[in-house]
Image: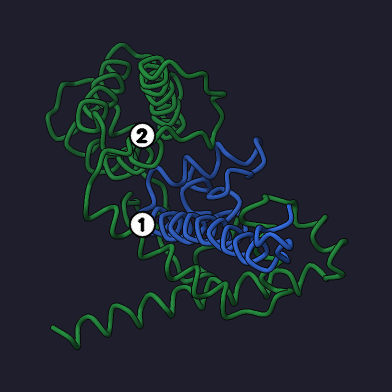
Amino acid sequence: MAEEQQLHPDDEQVERYALGVLAAQEIPMVEQHLLICGACQDRVEEMDAYVQGMQAAARQLRVEEMAKRVQRRPKSAGGTRIA
Amino acid sequence: MIDPRGAGLRGDTADSDARGQTPWPALIEKIQANDATGMEELYRIFSRGVRFFLWRQLGPQDMEDTVHDTFLTVAQAIRRGDVREPDKLMGFVWTIVRRHLATQIERTVNGRNQNVDLDGAARVLDYSPDPEWTAIVRQREMLAHRLLSEVSGRDREILVRFYLQEQPQEEICREMGLTETQFRLLKSRAKARFGALGRRKLARRRICW
């Protein structure tokens, strides 16, 4: 029990937890630790913010790239873009 | 897992006795004896963590009610003698929290007429319009967008594969010709840059005030 309390998850575990890909067998130990460790709660919240920001930004960049590709398509003789 | 003595981190919520162990048996005895300080201590140790999980999975909706229900359930179980191994109180509380979360998620999902596969990472956040929260989320997106715009095309591809496409690390390393160390270094730098951009933005705001 003391061991569960004192072992903080490492940065890779925190990232995997924030991404929702932490191994099932690791979740109980990490979550029980998070239940009582404010410092690690802060680490997870910080990682959540980063992951969510990156995901949203990556989606936005993809949209921008697609828009640029559409703009670069050559126009047909009638002035409309070729599909 | 890392040893906090090496990492310089310490749990700041649960107190420990001289042996480094939280006295769960003593706490359970207090609660079973209807000692008010026992409930206060239970709340002090676990309330931040319970709120952390509830907020993360459910958002602010019904937070206080669910926190209250969780502690009520734990206290009643302790008084009934359901905690057969006092040293495992933390695991017991965690189980109760998970059950309450699952119940709340099911209620929320049924209310929205959706089917959700419940796993440890499922989140059913309440996206009620909160201008401050919306601004915070937008800020994070802008910082991350700037970060992704600053890095090389190859680094951007790697980060997008990992964070957006959720491609496993091993696959990314194999397809992009990276070692595990190179991959971790890239992620670490990106996260550090995100943090630095955020702090710079905060510093600029303070100057403007």
What x and y, as percent, mark residue B203?
27, 84
Residue A31 tag number: none
For the colour green, the matching chain is B
Local secondary structure at mark 1: helix
Image quadrant in which the N terminus of chain B is located: bottom right
Image quadrant in which the C terminus of chain B is located: bottom left
What residue lies at 38% left-to-right and 36% top-to-bottom? B125
Marks 1 and 2: which is nearer the front? 1
Dot placed on the residue nearer the N-terminal end, 1 or 2: 2
Q: Quadrant of residue A45?
A: bottom left
Gap between marks 1 and 2 measured at Cα: 16 Å
Residue picked out by circle 2: B58
What x and y, as percent, mark residue B44?
22, 43
Left or right of B193: which side holds B80?
Answer: left
Residue picked out by circle 1: B137
Q: Dot 2 falls on which chain?
A: B
Relative to A44, does residue B62 appear above or below in the rendering?
above
Q: Nearer the viewer, residue B37 or B131?
A: B131
What x and y, as percent, mark residue B133?
27, 53
Extreme bottom residue here? B207
Q: Amino acid at mark 1?
A: Val
For the colour blue, the matching chain is A
